[in-house]
Amino acid sequence: MDSVTLQWVGAARILAQPDDEEALGFYGGLFGRLPSAVPHLGEVTRFVGYQRRAVDGRTTHVLGVEVERIVDLPEGLSGWALGPEVCTHWPGAGADPIVEPLRWLWRAAPAVSAGGLVGEFVLGDGRPFWLSANAYFRPDGRGAVDDSVHLVESDPAWPQQYAEFAGWLIEALGPDLALRVEHYGSTAIPGIPAKPVIDVLVEVPSFEAAKARAVPRFNAGEWDYWWHAGHMLFVRRAGLMGARTHHVHLAPRGHRLWEGLAFRDHLRGHPVDAQAYAALKRDLSVAHGRDRERYTQAKTDFVAAILARVGQQ
């Protein structure tokens, strides 16, 4: 195994829910602080995140920024260095490092990946860390586009854009991993406004199989990876920090994400419900236009009500 090390500076917190106000505050605070507070960043770096199930059933969340070296830790932040067989953790400025044996579950070094080292691992207590964030950016913000929620009217070109991308995606992942591919989200429902981003839902054999192949395959500046609400989400952009063009959701059969197809199909066949959803989306884009997480969460009740009706039919 090569000697490449993954180093980052950030913070960790045990959270009960991945999408409650405490979690949003934890992640939002770090996204705002880390690019300017942490020294020794490269011209291009990335957010690195991991999660691990805690002993009490809650989840440990770790988020940081990749660094060239771990020195001059800012107040309240920690440092991690993952080597081939050892994890070194600096719990704070001036603290002695803690060294633990490390075993990689899977690992892709830069030689076989377009970006930096990625992988998932187990430390001494046997509980695995799974990768939850891998997103490249320029700390100075150069080239960044506005990532707010902007709705546009329905575009008849969206189905063809999906079809072309789906063919490329199956080839990129392999048909043994991309078992089923569906056009997902509002761009798949004619006549309603949507963010101009093609959503794609991919059935995979398992998350374990998908991570080990898909994360290295899409480990590049134009791709963000997030473990989002219990499934894998890849965001494809028009270049580093560019506009979003595609969202690729990966989940095995039976995952709750697949309920979205029933929602899609219902709105395709029920114009009144589709227009009610369109009106809600317009209102929420005004109320939560600069907060994608809250914009998405605020649609939950409407989606749940439609799915309940579909289940009763």
Image (tube, rainbow, N blue to C red):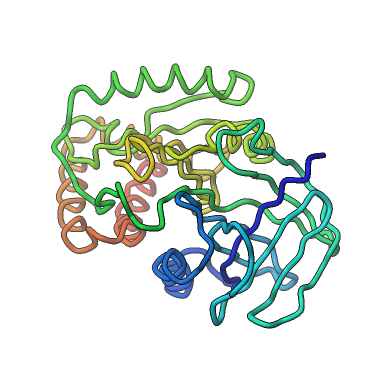
Q: Is residue 128 visible?
A: yes
Res. 77 image quadrant: bottom right
Whether residue 112 sits left or right of residue 261 in the image: it is right
Question: What residue is rendered at 70% in x and 56% in y?
Answer: 129
Q: Can residue 14 be seen in this view?
A: no
Res. 190 image quadrant: top left
Image quarter of the C terminus: top left
Callout count:
0
Front-lying residue, 295 or 85: 85
Res. 288 image quadrant: bottom left
Whether residue 159 sits left or right of residue 251 in the image: it is left
Front-lying residue, 248 or 222: 222
**Residue 241 in the image: above or below residue 268:** below
Front-lying residue, 29 or 200: 29
- Percent from the top left, x then y, of residue 84? 80, 49
- Percent from the top left, x then y, of residue 146? 24, 51
Whether residue 11 sits left or right of residue 27 in the image: it is right
Front-lying residue, 113 or 180: 113
Question: What residue is rendered at 46% in x and 44% in y?
Answer: 224
Image quarter of the N terminus: top right
- Percent from the top left, x then y, of residue 113? 61, 33
- Percent from the top left, x then y, of residue 55? 75, 70
Question: What residue is rendered at 35% in x and 40% in y?
Answer: 263
